[in-house]
Each structure stands twice: as C-alpha cells, then as structure tokens.
Image: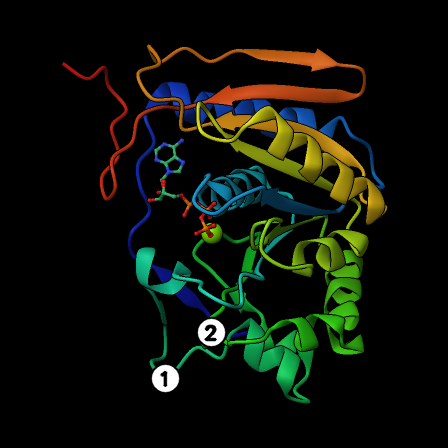
Amino acid sequence: MNKIIIKNNPDLPYAVEEAFNRLRINISFLGKDVRKIMVVSTTPNEGKSFIAMQLWRQMAETGYKSLLIDVDLRKSIMTEKYGMSLENGGKIEGTSYVLANDVPIKDSIFNTDIEAGDILPNVDNVINPSMLLENQRFEDLLDYAGENYRYTFIDAPPLDLVSDGERIGSLCDGAILVVRGGVTSKGMVKHSVMQLERAGCPLLGIILNRVEGSKGGYYYKKYGGRYYGHYGKYYSSDSYYYGKKS
Ligand SMILES: Nc1ncnc2c1ncn2[C@@H]1O[C@H](COP(=O)(O)OP(=O)(O)OP(=O)(O)O)[C@@H](O)[C@H]1O
Ligand SMILES: [Mg+2]
C-alpha cells in the first residue's frame, strides 16, 4: 500500500485533545454496528473536515483500524491544508479518480504514519460529483470500507447545497452533525436533521464547534442514545487560537 506523509498536523492543546478523546470513547460506546460515520453540517465552513480528521486520527492512534474518506468532491483542500504527499513521490489519485476509474479500491487507499490509519483524500475536484456518488462504484467503496475497517469517517459536503449529503448518509451507519456556534440557526439545523431522517441515516450526535470566545471549557451531555459535545474555540481564518484571546 502506498503511503501518504502528512506534514502539517496541528498540535492540539490539551483541552481540545481531551474533548476529542471523550468523543472517541462515546463513539466506541455506540456499538459494533456503527462503522461508517458521516461527518456533516448544514452549511459550509462549520468544521466538518477538522473534526473528521481529528476523530480519524484519535481512533487510529488508539489502535482501531480506521479510514478517512474525503467525499467533498467539489472543493476539497485536504491535501494542501495538511501538506499531504506520497512517500515515493508522484501524484495522489484521490476519491474522484477512484470513483471515475476502474481501479482496484484496495490499491487506491493510502497508509499513513499512523499504523492503523489509512486515508483516501480527494485531489481532483469535479464540477458535478452527484453522478459519481450515485454510481454503484461509490457503494462498492463504502462496502469495502465497512468490511475492512473498524471505523470509517466520511468527510462530507454540507447538506444545504445539493443532495450529495443525503446520498452519502443513506450508505452510512450514522452521522455526526457539526454545528457552528452562533452561526447556524435552529431552523437550519432542524432541516438537516430532517434530511438525515429522510436518508435513513441515524443521527449519532451533534457537535457544537467553533464557539468564539469560549473559555476553553468543554462540556458533554448525553440525551437518549446521543451525545452532545462542545468543542473548541476560537479560530481565525488561517490560524488556530486555543488560548483565551486577550
Ligand atoms: N474547533 C476548531 N478550532 C479551531 N479551528 C477550527 C475548529 N473547527 C474548524 N476550525 C477551522 O475552521 C476552518 C473551517 O473548518 P473546516 O474546513 O473543517 O470546515 P468544513 O465544514 O469542512 O468546511 P467546508 O464546508 O468548506 O468543507 C478551518 O480553517 C479549520 O481548521
Ligand atoms: Mg470540509
């Protein structure tokens, strides 16, 4: 298996690392049938990719065989943002390539520095990915993931754009809905919950993310079988603020 080197891995402050740790534990309580988890939000920029990446990393570092699939086929920036490159040089053929070409799925997934962590980023963004997602090939990819990995995290596009999120959700065991604090309205969140229901994708939990000005606290509550977490903080367009803003 080809290996991807991830150069820019942000060092998370203790409180944030700990928040992900708790989230990881809560996910493991969801039972053995929850394997393919879509990380989704109502609108763009709420923190899906950040959360999918951190969860995948934590699960893999704990020793669970985990796969991260980037299914944001329209505008993924994963490889640039995290400085990903192939260990042996050459071009990474990502998710859209795998879905559009008859290549063995097994050989299209990459290993990383984390032994139990494999990844399939998207590299070539496409204008109309719905066709690729509707294809049987996408089902084959997710079947392969379900059969070969304990956890698969799917970094999805936002639900408000097109029906891609519903299609992806219909093939997953559940979804984590990321909500940007103070920005996404209750009505919009309700609509997303309805879309997930319509897709037959159980809502596993909601993460309140990017809460500006929070004091670094983290709280966690469980409602019924769901968890509800509050992660992290502050944030500016290109840098991380984890301490209190002065
Ligand atoms: N809890 C957090 N703390 C600090 N920075 C964060 C946090 N969550 C997200 N960010 C940052 O906010 C920006 C948007 O996050 P991200 O790209 O994960 O959102 P997204 O929902 O995947 O967006 P898109 O819809 O465009 O795919 C990124 O720069 C990311 O690193
Ligand atoms: Mg994203």
Q: Which residue is mark 1?
A: 90
What separation in Å lies between label 2 and label 1 (alpha carbons)?
Answer: 18 Å
**Vertical arrangement, residue 128 with respect to residue 209, above or below:** below
Lateral position of residue 12 relative to residue 150, left or right = left
Quadrant where the image shows the C terminus = top left
Q: Position of residue 70 (x, y in %)?
A: 54, 60
Residue furthest toward the left?
246
Q: Amino acid at mark 2?
A: Asn
Q: Position of residue 191 (x, y in %)?
A: 69, 37
Q: Going by the image, does 196 lie left or right of 126?
A: right
Indicate left or right for 5 with 117 as reference: left
Q: Nearer the viewer, mark 2 or mark 1?
A: 2
* Residue type, numbered disc 1: Gly
Q: Residue at x 75, y 44 (%)?
A: 195
Which residue in the structure is indicated by mark 2?
125
Where does the image place residue 123, in percent across and percent down from the top left?
44, 73
Q: Front-most of 37 and 168?
A: 168
